[in-house]
Amino acid sequence: MISSVLNQDGSLGNGSQAIVYLTQFLSGFVWPQVIIDLIGFKFALMLAETCYLLFFLANTFPSWATLVPGSILSGFANSLAWTILGIYFTILSKKLSLLKNITFVHAQTLLFGIFGFIFFFNYILGSLWIGTILQLKDLSVNATFDYSKSCGANNCPLTTLPEAASKPSVSSVYALCGTINGACFLAIIIAFLFVDDLKYDENMNKIERGNISFQKLVQKFKAEFKSLFELSKQLKIWLLMPIAMFLGYELTYIWYEFHRGFVSCLKNVNYIGWTSILFGGAASIFSLLSSKYVKHIGLQTTMVLMLMMSLINQVFMISWTPNPNSGSYVIFLMSVSFAFTDCLATSQVRAVFGIYFPDNTSAYSAAIIFETIGLVLGSVLSIYFCTYIKLYVFMGITIASIFSFIYLEINQSKKSDTHTF
C-alpha cells in the first residue's frame, strides 16, 4: 500500500492501485502458467520480483508517467508470484507427503503455514521501517469532534479526522523508498542463489522447459484457456469463489476502513504502526500453528471457525459505539482478531484450491481472479460508501463463504469416503 500512502495528490495513489488490481485480474488467466512452463519457477519468481522492484522505483519518483507502467508491472507480478507459490507448494507437498508418510492435506497446510509465518513477519519489519524512517509527528486534536458519529462504522470517505499527522519530509520518503528497493533487490539475489527450480515433479518425471517458439506459445495459451474453461464447468470452483473473494475483500477492509475509521479516527495516524506490529506478530504465530489446527480439528472446522470469528468481529464493529478513552484495547483486540482470520485466509485458502484441484494448476489462476474481484469490490466501496455499508457487504460475503464451503465439504464427502479433513 506504499503507493496509496505516499502518493495521495490527485488520486495518484488510489489510481495506481486500481491499475494494479485490473492488471492482476487480466493477467491471472493464463500468463503465469505459460511463463512458468517456459522459464521455470526460479526465473519466473525473479521476473516477478524484478517487476516489484520497478514498481517501487516508480513510487520513488511518483507521477502518472512512472506509476501507470509501474502499476501494470506490479499487477502482473502479483498474479505471477501467487501462482508460482501455489503450484510450487503443491508439488513440494506431494513430495513431502511421500517422504514423511503424511497426508497431502497435512503437508499442504504445513508448508502454507510456514509461508504465512514469514509473510506476516514482514508486517512487523515494514511497520518498524516506516515508523523509524518517516518519523511522522502528530498535529493538534480537534477537541469538539464527535467520535461516536464519525468514527467506527459511521466513518465515511469524506469524514475529516480529528487529528492529523505531519507530512513526511522528502528526504525521509526517499530513504524509505531506497530501503524498500534495496530489500527487493536482495530478494532477487536470494531467489537466484537459493530457489530450487524443481526440474522433476512429485512423480520424478522431468519437467521440460524452454524451447520457446511462437507456435508453442500459441499452443500453450490454447491449452491454458481450455483448462480454465473446463474448470469453470465444475461446481467446486464456484463454491470456492466466495471464500477467495473473502480474502481479497478482508484485505481492503483492513487497509482502508479499519486503519482509517477505527485506528486513525479514534487514536492517531501513528497508531497504525503499533496495530500493524501487533497484527503481524499475532498473524505470524497463528500461521505457524495453522497446520496444528488442521491436524487436530480438520480443515473444514478450521476454515469455518475462521469465518465465524470474522463474522463475530464484523458484528461487533458495526454495533460498537466508538470511544477514544476506552478505544485502545478494543482496537488491539480487533487487530488480533483480524490477525487470526487473515493469516488463515492467506495461508489456507490457497491451500484449499490445491487440495481440491491437485492436478489442475489453473485452479490457482481462478483463486487469483476471485481474490482480485474481492479486492476491486472492496476498493470501490471504500471510495464511495461509509464503513457500515462495507461491513454489511463483508457480512454477506462471509455468510456465503460459510454455507458454500460446508456444502462443498458435504458433497465431497459423499463422492469419496477417502477424502477426509
Image: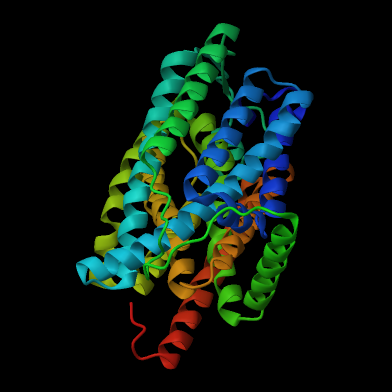
What residue is rendered at 43% in x and 60% in y?
312
The foreground one among 85 and 287 is: 85
What residue is rendered at 57% in x and 29% in y?
53
The foreground one among 379 and 137 is: 379
Q: Is residue 156 above or below residue 414?
A: above
Determine the image quadrant of residue 396.
bottom right
Determine whether, in the image, residue 46 is placed left or right of residue 278. Answer: right
Residue 31's spot in the image, x, y percent? 66, 54
Q: Is residue 95 above or below residue 166?
A: below
Most extreme residue toward the front, as rendered?
A: 211
Determine the image quadrant of residue 98.
bottom left
Q: Is residue 342 visible?
A: yes
What residue is rendered at 32% in x and 44% in y?
284
Q: Dividing the image into 4 quarters, which one contains the N terminus?
A: top right
Residue 47's spot in the image, x, y percent? 57, 39
The foreground one among 137 and 49 is: 49
What residue is rendered at 44% in x and 81% in y?
409
Q: Is residue 6 visible?
A: no
Determine the image quadrant of residue 103.
bottom left
Q: Dividing the image into 4 quarters, which one contains the C terminus?
A: bottom left
Residue 51's spot in the image, x, y percent? 61, 35
Determine whether, in the image, residue 71 is placed left or right of residue 45. Answer: right
Q: Is residue 117 above or below residue 65?
A: below
